[in-house]
Amino acid sequence: MKLQRVTSVDRTTIPTALLPAFKTHCRVEFTRDDQYLTQALVRAFDVFERLTEFHVFAVAYDWQPDWPAGGTEKIEIPMQPVEDFVVTDGEGTDVSSDYEIVGVVGSDQMARQWLQPVSGASWPSSGSVMLALGYSVADDLPPGITDIGFRVGAFLYENREMAAITAVDVMAYANSFISGYWVPRA
């Protein structure tokens, strides 16, 4: 299976939209630290993504799965949350209407998802799947992820010289990542 990033990750939209609420959380009433606060929030969500393998920032991937020969079995999607997808066959024709995502489908659910053919369809012999992952609108971000991002971002803002290397066991509130948002992978 090949996985290739097609577009750059949008690390600007979500933190910029959340800045006013994040400033309230941090009890900051001035503007001179706005850029630093935004970067603290970017780093907090980046930590979340790396620890949970759950995308916050909007990103598109070109996924080339190992297509099953014929058949209609499911193919596990290697990343989440999938907000949209486009399946193209070997000739580049959009055949998305022949497929669906199953499993726990919902952008605030951390669970495995699969791609499968709909009734009567089968897998193409080649082609790719464009996956749109993460969130492009701050209001769509689940409250639990926003809360953890704010807590870790505030820690990074207040303790910028004292923080140890970012990890689950040394970052304040980071243990919340694995208790509610980490999905074991085999």
Image (cartoon, rainbow, N blue to C red):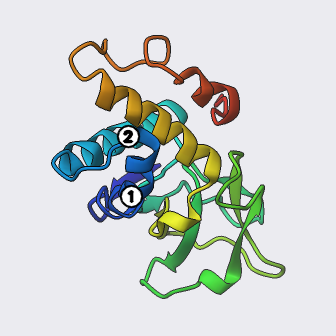
Q: In the image, residue 6 lies at what x, y percent?
A: 31, 64
* Amino acid at the residue labelled 1: Pro
Residue at position x 70%, y 54% in the image = 113
User: Mark 1: few, some, or many residues within 10 Å (few <14, many ≥20)?
Assistant: some
Mark 2 vs mark 1: which is more N-terminal? 1
- In the picture shown, does residue 28 fall above or below 101? above
Q: Is residue 184 toward the left or the right of residue 137 in the image?
A: right
Residue at position x 56%, y 42% in the image = 147
Pointer 2: what residue? 46
Q: In the image, residue 162 lies at what x, y percent?
A: 26, 12
Q: Secondary structure at mark 2?
A: helix
Q: Give the foreground label among 2 and 1.
A: 1
Pointer 1: what residue? 20
109 or 77: nearer the viewer? 109
Q: Is residue 6 toward the left or the right of residue 121 in the image?
A: left
Label 2 to label 1, Cα distance in Å? 19 Å
User: Mark 2: few, some, or many residues within 10 Å (few <14, many ≥20)?
Assistant: some
